[in-house]
């Protein structure tokens, strides 16, 4: 009886060499306060200078998200006091963000759904506080890092849609190569605004803001929990309080952080240290030309050029590097039907990649070596099962499939004389099963095939073994 | 013969070039003079920082080789205290030099290590709002020096500075220059880098010279002007050699005299002296006509909205976290409900800022607050544009505008300290210039019967500093005022 309304605010840390308004390095994981200067420390007298690359990246993202890039844009100061914010204001954008009015298409219940993007603006990050027993320490390495905040309209109606939106958004940003989009390192952060209302009601319900989710699954779980919590509150006749709630990943629940009953006044006003920017049409069109083929287009092309089904293509285009690797494989793969290759890519390859927390293209595996391995499967030299093990070995050792198969003696036994001996043995060791088969239980033969496989240490070609078993059983 | 410290920079440079005096002698003479008159004038703060002159490293070549320059306490000097004369910044030693300081060092100038006194964070027009106490006017010690760059102006007037830098947000260079009988120059907004100037109101602030004569002003402008990639509001327009503007000729120069600047309530002596100066310019060949700047009456209210709004934001960073003053006082019984952090913020800012700083932060916070922004800040921005347009219109027909610098001569110490509004009105003639972003100069143009100096203000269109130098130089050539010295 309730309908869910979700809006997402995603912060993407832009992968520039230097910070948003000064020349400090953006490298991750350095010693505290080794990447700071008078500007990002907000020392008296210092002035910000906009990083042109960060600005270009923001425009690029805006264009890729189907936004209108504004010709006239400016920065504003957003004021709040916190020790990790050196100037006690953040340089952000208020009423004239770089880009506005975009959208992102996602798949929801088998249909394409359009999620509108309200705005995408550039701002600087704050530092980090490290709380100890009696004191808090401030690390300003992160202060002044360039962030792009992408705000969706409240068009998302389920945790699954939120998840889909994030996956799609991340994929696009990664394709643009403007961010690492690594939630664990904080280069992608997501806050969610969520409310519920009775079906058919037009006004939005009171929303809560969810923070502290450090994975897409976390976002989905937090939303699922929060929607249920709000429903329970309303069902019991209670009211939702507008507040910020933190996702507790251990307890799997949202916890109230602070009440937003008193609306915060950030006292935004135009940043007087940075004159407004006028973006030339030529600049927009130049940046537009630099946008690579995006996941949706690539997916369509994979389906058309390589005859992939939608589901397979969708998996392959998630990461740009992975898609490039897959495309190289597909173009070098002789067979017109790419399915056998694709099955390996999205099956064993992807699971090896996932288990190593890497991408398809980052497994140190040459396209040629992978194709050699697939050749061996197709020649029945090894079984699919063996292939999985060989693949793992190839990735671990860097050796070629041929060497591994030879060294470990993994080639399938398709040689009939050897298999016939094992087949006879299996039949004589299991007379009852053999009798079952002969009396018409066709499936019983699979047990015998299994026995042959077992005896040969998995090297028997299962098809060959089955053929021989069938023949021997009908001979006798 | 005059002592070295009493010379102008251009006179000193000639002596140095001619080998008549050593590179360090000017700063040695200056140090002696500072120790002699400071007990009376108090133009400098933290005199203990001064050190012994004569051992400074001097860049091997440059336009100001061997010339001492005194610096206002809000311009960052690497390793030297820069405190804006506020308890809030006590002990703050910037790890970097402001761009103007870098340029001065490269030009061979000697930076005087004690800084000059000012109103706290440049909030004031008398240098009484300094946590170190007021500077006294060398012409009459019971009078104020004007402000906020009062220390720089007094030091130049008392020959305890050869050249000085001030900053001007609403008249803070020109008004004290006029009160002290010296030359104060406010460049076009964007002409001089603000990098390293501790901001009061970012859209109005400019650093500029305070000097003994117009030629020195041009000399110092030559060194400090120019585009700086560290200041996005600095403008990339070629800087001319301002010494070439020092032409003794105002024939047919068209000068506008704004009628709104000669109003009831202005000091009659100031009026007479300024009118005489205008007559002098006429006799020198200038074509002077009355003009109108109809929105002048709104300048003070507009200024106090925009300037305080920006100041409230610029001063937000002074919170006791990273540098400067931090209150260690806590009264748990009263503040037990507040976190230690909030308590630290409140006490640090409550104890660290002076009265005027608090007043302006409160005003600025108010005008930027939700629900008031449109009525105050936004409206003020619109009127600012109208004020700018008034000037554009006049400058389409006139080469410059001449006005008094201040409606009165220096007032007595303490006279206006309790009345912020009367204090604010002493900048009534200087504020519009900052709102419009145009350049202006104040030069001495006479003395009252009591012996206090009066200043003449000349304004020109943006980036036409040359016109100011030309008119001011011509006037100066035919008048004795800049050569007068206080008896101290």
Image: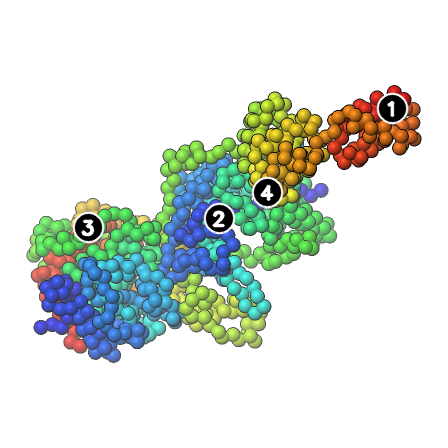
Residue B441 picture location, percent across and down? 20, 58
Residue A147 has which mark?
A: 2
Same chain under badges 4 and 1? The reply is yes
Q: Are marks 1 and 2 in contact (CB under 8 Å)?
A: no
Residue A473 has which mark?
A: 1
- Label 4, label 1: how far apart the Cα atoms are: 49 Å
Same chain under badges 4 and 3? The reply is no
Q: Secondary structure at mark 3?
A: loop
Q: Residue at x 86, y 25 (%)?
A: A442
Q: Is residue B331 left or right of residue B305?
A: right
Q: Are marks 4 and 3 in contact (CB under 8 Å)?
A: no
* Chain on which label 2 sits: A
Nearer the observer, disc 1 or disc 3?
A: 1
Q: Residues within 10 Å of mark 3 (few under 14, many from 20)?
A: some
Q: Residues within 10 Å of mark 1 (few under 14, many from 20)?
A: some
- Label 1, label 3: how far apart the Cα atoms are: 106 Å
Same chain under badges 3 and 2? The reply is no
Q: Residue at x 60, y 58 (%)?
A: A258
Viewer-side residue, B325 vs A304: A304
Nearer the observer, disc 4 or disc 1?
A: 1
Q: Residue at x 67, y 26 (%)?
A: A378
């Amino acid at each position: 009886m309730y309908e869910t309304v979700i809006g997402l605010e995603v912060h993407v840390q832009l992968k520039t060499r230097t910070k948003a308004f000064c020349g400090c390095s953006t490298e991750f994981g350095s010693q505290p306060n080794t990447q700071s200067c008078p500007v990002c420390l907000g020392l008296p007298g210092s002035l910000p200078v906009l990083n042109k690359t960060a600005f270009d990246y923001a425009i690029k993202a805006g264009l890729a998200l189907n936004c209108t890039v504004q010709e006239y844009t400016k920065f504003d100061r957003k004021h709040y006091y916190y020790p990790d914010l050196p100037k006690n204001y953040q340089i952000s954008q208020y009423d004239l963000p770089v880009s506005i009015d975009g959208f992102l298409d996602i798949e929801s219940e088998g249909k394409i759904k359009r999620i509108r993007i309200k705005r995408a603006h550039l701002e600087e990050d704050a530092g980090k506080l490290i709380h100890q027993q009696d004191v808090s320490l401030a690390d300003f390495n992160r202060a002044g890092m360039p962030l792009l905040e992408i705000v969706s309209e409240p068009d998302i109606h389920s945790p699954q849609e939120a998840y889909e939106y994030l996956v799609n958004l991340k994929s696009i940003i990664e394709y643009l190569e403007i961010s690492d989009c690594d939630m664990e390192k904080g280069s992608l952060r997501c806050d969610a605004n969520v409310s519920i209302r009775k079906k058919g009601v037009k006004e939005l319900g009171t929303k809560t803001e969810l923070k502290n989710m450090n994975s897409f699954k976390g976002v989905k779980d937090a939303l699922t929990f929060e929607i249920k919590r709000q429903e329970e509150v309303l069902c019991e006749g209670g009211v939702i309080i507008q507040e910020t709630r933190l996702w507790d990943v251990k307890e799997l629940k949202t916890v109230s952080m602070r009440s937003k009953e008193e609306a915060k006044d950030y006292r935004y006003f135009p940043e007087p240290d940075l004159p407004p920017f006028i973006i030339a049409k030529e600049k927009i069109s130049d940046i537009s030309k630099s946008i690579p083929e995006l996941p949706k287009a690539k997916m369509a092309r994979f389906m058309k050029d390589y005859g992939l089904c939608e589901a397979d293509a969708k998996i392959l285009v998630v990461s740009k590097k992975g898609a490039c690797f897959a495309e190289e494989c597909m173009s070098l793969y002789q067979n017109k039907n790419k399915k056998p290759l694709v099955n390996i890519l999205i099956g064993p390859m992807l699971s090896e990649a996932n288990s190593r927390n890497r991408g398809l293209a980052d497994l140190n595996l040459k396209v040629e070596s992978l194709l050699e391995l697939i050749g061996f499967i197709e020649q029945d030299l090894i079984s699919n099962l063996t292939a999985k093990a060989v693949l793992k070995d190839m990735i671990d050792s860097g050796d070629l499939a041929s060497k591994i198969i030879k060294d470990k003696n993994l080639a399938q036994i398709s040689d009939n004389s050897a298999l016939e001996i094992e087949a006879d043995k299996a039949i004589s060791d299991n007379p009852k099963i053999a009798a079952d088969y002969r009396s018409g239980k066709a499936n019983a033969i699979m047990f015998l095939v299994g026995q042959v496989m077992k005896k040969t240490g998995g090297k028997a070609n299962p098809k060959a073994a089955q053929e021989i078993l069938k023949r021997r059983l009908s001979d006798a | 013969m005059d002592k070295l410290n009493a010379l102008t920079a251009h006179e000193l440079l000639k002596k140095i070039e001619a080998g008549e005096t050593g590179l360090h002698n000017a700063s040695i003479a200056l140090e002696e003079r500072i120790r002699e008159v400071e007990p009376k004038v108090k133009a400098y703060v933290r005199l203990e920082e001064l050190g012994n002159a004569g051992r400074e490293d001097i860049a091997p070549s440059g336009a100001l080789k061997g010339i001492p320059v005194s610096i206002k306490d809000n311009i960052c000097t690497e390793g030297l205290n820069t405190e804006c004369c506020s308890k809030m910044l006590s002990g703050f030693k910037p790890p970097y030099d402001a761009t103007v300081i870098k340029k001065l060092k490269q030009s061979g100038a000697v930076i005087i290590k004690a800084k000059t006194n000012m109103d706290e964070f440049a909030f004031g027009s008398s240098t009484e709002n300094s946590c170190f106490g007021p500077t006294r006017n060398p012409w009459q010690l019971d009078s104020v020096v004007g402000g906020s760059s009062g220390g720089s102006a007094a030091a130049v007037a008392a020959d305890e500075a050869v050249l000085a830098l001030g900053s001007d947000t609403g008249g803070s260079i020109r008004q004290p220059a006029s009160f002290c009988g010296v030359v104060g120059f406010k460049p076009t907004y964007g002409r001089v880098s603000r990098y390293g100037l501790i901001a009061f109101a970012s859209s109005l602030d400019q650093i500029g010279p305070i000097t003994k004569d117009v030629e020195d002003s041009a000399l110092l402008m030559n060194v400090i002007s120019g585009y700086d990639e560290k200041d996005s509001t600095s403008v990339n327009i070629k800087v001319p050699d301002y010494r070439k503007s020092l032409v003794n000729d105002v024939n047919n120069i068209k000068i506008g005299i704004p009628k709104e600047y000669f109003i009831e309530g202005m000091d009659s002596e100031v009026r007479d002296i300024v009118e005489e100066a205008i007559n002098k310019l006429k006799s020198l060949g200038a074509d002077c006509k009355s003009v109108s700047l109809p929105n002048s009456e709104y300048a003070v209210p507009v200024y106090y909205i925009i300037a305080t709004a920006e100041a409230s934001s610029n001063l937000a960073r002074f919170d006791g976290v990273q540098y400067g003053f931090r209150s260690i006082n806590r009264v748990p019984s009263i503040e037990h409900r507040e976190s230690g952090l909030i308590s630290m913020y409140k006490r640090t800012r409550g104890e660290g800022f002076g009265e005027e700083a608090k007043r302006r932060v409160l005003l600025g916070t108010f005008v930027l607050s939700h629900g008031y922004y449109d009525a105050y800040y936004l409206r003020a921005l619109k009127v600012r544009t109208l004020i700018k347009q008034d000037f554009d219109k006049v400058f389409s027909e006139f080469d410059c505008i001449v006005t008094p610098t201040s409606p009165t001569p220096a007032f007595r110490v303490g006279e206006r300290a309790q009345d912020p509004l009367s204090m604010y009105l002493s900048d009534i003639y200087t504020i519009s210039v900052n709102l419009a972003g145009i350049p202006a100069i104040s030069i001495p143009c006479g003395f009252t019967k009591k012996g206090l100096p009066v200043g003449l203000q000349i304004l020109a269109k943006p980036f036409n500093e040359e016109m100011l130098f030309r008119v001011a130089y011509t006037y100066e050539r035919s008048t004795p005022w800049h050569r007068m010295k206080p008896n101290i």
